[in-house]
Image (spheres, rainbow, N blue to C red):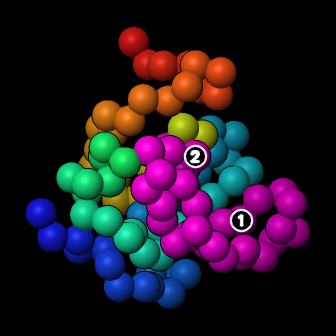
Amino acid sequence: MKNECGKTRKVEEPYEIWQSIDGTWEYRVLKKYQAPDKEKTNRYARWFCAVKSPFTYGSWEYGDTYVIDVIGNARKVFPVGENIVYNVRIPNAVYKEAK
């Protein structure tokens, strides 16, 4: 499968937007380094993101973020209706496994 998200985008035109449940954190996915089929099995897969949180005082902070950190702490809000299931085993000490 081809990586459709391999070219870096501007923060105003992200591939995906993820938000924490309480809405205080927002992750804008600007680039994905791997195709989805490879990403699903790689616990060290990463995305280049712009992140806004209570600690960034209203501005965006840019950098690579582990996919598992985003999907474990946020929900996708854009594009709507497209859910990806990841088969990466997460240590119980860090996250509770979904049943």
- Residue at horizontal 42%, vertical 64%? 16
Report x, y in % for residue 72. 54, 38
Amino acid type, mark 1: Lys
Instruction: Say left or right for 43 vs 54.
Output: left
From this view, report whether residue 37 is shown above or below residue 85: below
- Inspect the magenta stretch and tell me whether residue 25 lies in it: no
Q: Secondary structure at mark 2?
A: helix
**Residue under circle 1?**
52
Answer with the quarter of the image where residue 74 lies: top right
From this view, report whether residue 87 is shown above or below residue 24: above
The number of callouts visible is 2
Answer with the quarter of the image where residue 32 lies: bottom left
| Mark closer to the observer (1, 2) | 2
Q: Going by the picture, which residue comes out furthest to the left?
A: 1
Report x, y in % for residue 18. 52, 54
- Inspect the magenta stretch and tell me whether residue 52 lies in it: yes
Asked whether 77 or 10 is in front, the reply is 10
Report x, y in % for residue 1. 12, 63
Amino acid type, mark 2: Asp
- Residue at horizontal 71%, vertical 75%? 60
Residue 43 is at least partly visible in this image: yes
**Residue under circle 2?**
69
Asked whether 98 or 93 is in front, the reply is 93
Residue range corresponding to the magenta coloring:
43-71
From this view, report whether residue 86 is shown above or below residue 6: above
